[in-house]
Image (cartoon, rainbow, N blue to C red):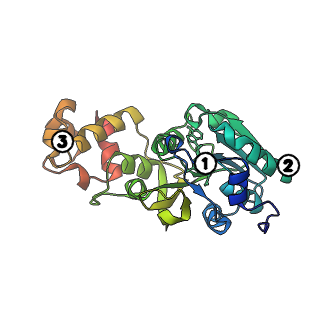
Amino acid sequence: MAALDGLPPLRDVIQRHGLDARKALGQNFLLDLNLTQKVARTAGGLEGTTVFEVGPGPGGLTRAILALGAKKVIAVERDTRCLPALAEIADHYPGRLEVIEGDALKTDFESLAPEGPIKIIANLPYNVGTQLLVNWLLPKTWPPFWQSLTLMFQKEVGERIVAGEDDDHYGRLGVLCGWRTEARMAFDVAPQAFTPPPKVTSTVVHLTPRENPIPCSVANLEKVTQAAFGQRRKMLRQSLKPLGGESLLVKAGIDPARRAETLSVEEFCLLANSL
Ligand SMILES: C[S@@+](CC[C@H](N)C(=O)[O-])C[C@H]1O[C@@H](n2cnc3c(N)ncnc32)[C@H](O)[C@@H]1O
């Protein structure tokens, strides 16, 4: 039976093109088009937007994004075996799907960005997901070239992305995300929803850029969060010793007896600016 978009069911596509999932490429495919539509809908209205997708695979999420009215999808896929399946989707939606064969970690998304609103939506390969997120959080200019990020991660990574102070998952990633974005977890996806099922639950995270993040040097912020969370159970006067310890903390107006996980994002920016 054909799917609602008139294209063949994803199981048939996978079989016909011999797309057995490869672990090294983080391949856990979503074959339920209702679920891929739920992921795509989390990004909000797609009409008139260009969507960057990383790792379209056999195209389940790509199809959902196109069916929901995105003007264009630019998808970067490393596995050449997926290209014929994606070409069928491109034929079905003329002029609306561009597939770039390559490594998303080496792709300069900013330079590919066309005029008009851009959203990034992806069921990310687990081994490169966090690095891609960090790249998108640190573009050449801010506000960034994207309007929102809607990304699937392992749940544990999602928890670190949205964590604020006094949360066990709070760390360097939470500070970076909290500094530049408003981040929320949208919904969890059970392992059985994927083919093959991964070992852990996944979660969809939605991030939108803050218009005016506190001015702060990324390099300094990295230095203080790395030192502070590197010894998260110690008092900051101890963990920040290589960066000036007590005198740095006094300069920033922060009690040297506090611990990393109690500091707000704003306080980390204060510390970075006092370096
Ligand atoms: C978790 S699967 C998601 C597939 C599809 N989007 C879905 O939801 O069913 C991750 C996809 O990313 C691709 N991939 C892995 N590493 C990549 C990289 N560095 N650059 C681009 N694509 C990559 C894999 O080949 C795979 O198709």
Whole-percent x, y for residue 273 in the image: 33, 37
Q: Please, is residue 47 above or below residue 57 in the view?
A: below
Res. 274 mark? none
What element does badge 1 sit on?
A: loop
Judging depth in this view, the residue of 124 and 141 nearest the camera is 124
Q: Quadrant of the C terminus?
A: top left
Label 2: which secondary element? helix
The residue mark sitting in front, 2 or 1, is: 1
Q: Residue at x 16, y 36 (%)?
A: 245
Q: Does the residue labelled 1 lie within 8 Å of ligand 1?
A: no
Nearest to N terminus: mark 2 or mark 1: 1
Snapshot quadrant of residue 12: bottom right
For residue 235, side relative to residue 270 (left or right): left
Distance (Cα) linking label 2 and label 3: 63 Å
Q: What residue type is labelled 1?
A: Asp
Marks 2 and 3: which is nearer the front?
A: 2
Q: Residue at x 50, y 40 (%)?
A: 24
- Name the image quarter holding the N terminus: bottom right
Q: Which residue position holds label 2?
A: 91
Residue 183 image point, x, y percent: 47, 58
- Say whether marks 1 and 3 touch (CB < 8 Å): no
Expressed as whole percent of the image width and height from the top left, the position of residue 243 reads 22, 31
Three-letter amino acid code at the position of disc 2: Asp
Q: Quick one: SS at disc 3?
A: helix
Residue behind mark 1: 20
Q: Residue at x 48, y 66 (%)?
A: 190
- Asked if residue 202 lies left or right of residue 261, the reply is right
Q: Which mark is residue 250?
A: 3
Left or right side of 198 for 98:
right
Label 3: how many residues lie within 10 Å, few (<14), some (14-19) or many (20+)?
A: some
